Amino acid sequence: MIDTREHQRFPVLTPAQIDTARRFASGPETRFTPGETIYAIGDHGAPAWLVIDGTIEVVRRDGLSREAVVTVHHAGQFSGEVNQLAGRPSIAAGRAGDSGCTALPLDPAHLRALMVGSADVGEIVMRALILRRVSLIEQGGAGTILIGTPGNPDMVRLQEFLGRSGLPNLVLDIRSDEEGRALVERTGVLPDELPLVVCPTGSVLKRPSVEELAACLGVVPTIDPDRLYDVAVVGAGPAGLATAVYAASEGLSVIVLDSRAMGGQAGASARIENYLGFPTGISGQALAGRAFNQALKFGAEVAIPVSVERLECEGATLSLHCAEERRVKARAVVIASGARYRRPDVPNLAEFEGAGISYWVSAIEARLCAGEEVVLVGGGNSAGQAVVFLAPQVRKLHLVVRRDLAETMSRYLIDRIAALPNVEMHVGSEIAGLEGDRQTGLTAATFRDRHDGSLTRREVRHMFLFIGADPNTDWANDCVDTDAKGFIVTGADALSLETSRPGIFAIGDVRAGSTKRVAAAVGEGAAVVAQIHSLFAEHANQEMHR
């Protein structure tokens, strides 16, 4: 699909467009000799280079030790991909061609200024950077290399983070890939130290946590504890990303924090078909990726994964205390932390999380259970979207729901599920027991009919749970009022999205009384920015009259 958009991925600017770009350059024209490195894999803050004369040869990693040419940029073309927007480490390298190269640099700040200052050139550049990232993901050779056994819980955990973060990665199966197996043997890695991770810079990690992997990739920006942001947003789902886009585009300094990945629960949706403007549907990950890039374009900082542990609200300045002793100060805090996946009361459930039980369905899980019999529990729209995506790829899908689908799911999804020949409904049932162990994973599940107590056992290795979520508010409970279910109460005063503590707002699924839809979350993300402006204006007025 990307190959058909080659002209958009590697556009050639016209002389007039080059003149426009010159006004935003971060430095003078630079001459590079033939073969000279212009930027290397792993370089932080590497600018995008606009070629004036000569060529730039762009290469990526192809496996552990090989290089592959991505493209050759000629006069009028520019280097870079999405990482250049945020100053993150480069995942490809560029060197001057056989005749050398003369090029203009656009560092991250000046590149963002170009996109905002020139709608014409900015659109061309933004589209190209996004398509190049998509291409690198499809090719699979650039970025991070995971070495181990596909399907291993730790491997899946890292794949999920990379996939949902839109970071290119390649998996080498030690059972069949000689290069990966040779590296494991050469480094003396023990089985319980797998998976082995090779970062784009060449650094090697043994069975890292997501936080350790993120640090190696350089995707978490350095947070200045003394800087005062206008707005700190907790949660990078649709509501939080919408806040970032609207606030940053209106000149406010913004930082977004999330402990997992961009997209929130919506990011796990395989296809959203009732979101305005997308008649053929869009995946939650694609929607989140577009919003993420928009936020970067307008200068918002996004820190993922960074877990917020406590909100301090005494005094004039609000403070977020985060993991790794990070601290963020802000004039206003927007709580868009959504909800955490609800877990059914089933003995030994935790034993199988990541070893057969998942709370989302992505392409990774679909590949792992292709052709098998699986169970999916839940009757909401998220569950319906997952069924429609997963059923065509498995032999049989058991859908376990407590109530009739008409009570909880949109009609178009109900009709779609009814047309799937390999979906067996278990209405009025719940999960009663799980079999297997951590070593072998899930092997069987038992359903209980809630009306007559009868039990049904099925041998399955994969179960997906979509039974709702509980508000993710523990870290903020000391500062804001919540209802009996833990959702944050808003609208006590004139500002409808403000909490019981002035300057702290709540939007999206975490807010009491909110409509649990992506469109509603995005709308609240836009509306809260207007209310923040009102708050700041009121504060300014009070200062003037002191």
Image (cartoon, grey):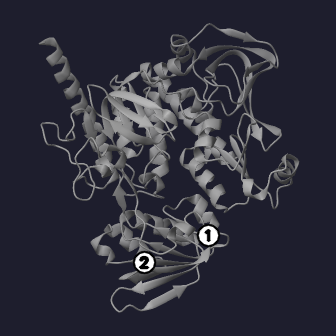
Q: Which residue is mark 1?
A: 369
Is 467 rendered above or below residue 399?
A: above
Quarter occupied by residue 249: top left
The residue at the point 45 percent across, 37 percent down is 322
Q: Residues within 10 Å of mark 2 (few under 14, many from 20)?
A: many
Tell me the crowding category of disc 1: few under 14, some 14 to 19, or many 20 or more residues within 10 angstroms, Cα based. many
Q: Is residue 332 above or below residue 510?
A: above
Q: Amino acid at mark 1?
A: Cys
Picture quarter with the C terminus: top left
Q: Circle 1 sits in a helix, a strand or a loop, which is it?
A: loop
- For marks 2 and 1, give the CA distance: 18 Å
The answer to whether residue 540 is left or right of residue 258 is left
Looking at the image, residue 242 lies above or below residue 442: above
Foreground of the two, 472 or 526: 472
Q: Which residue is mark 2?
A: 400
x%, y% of residue 52?
A: 66, 14
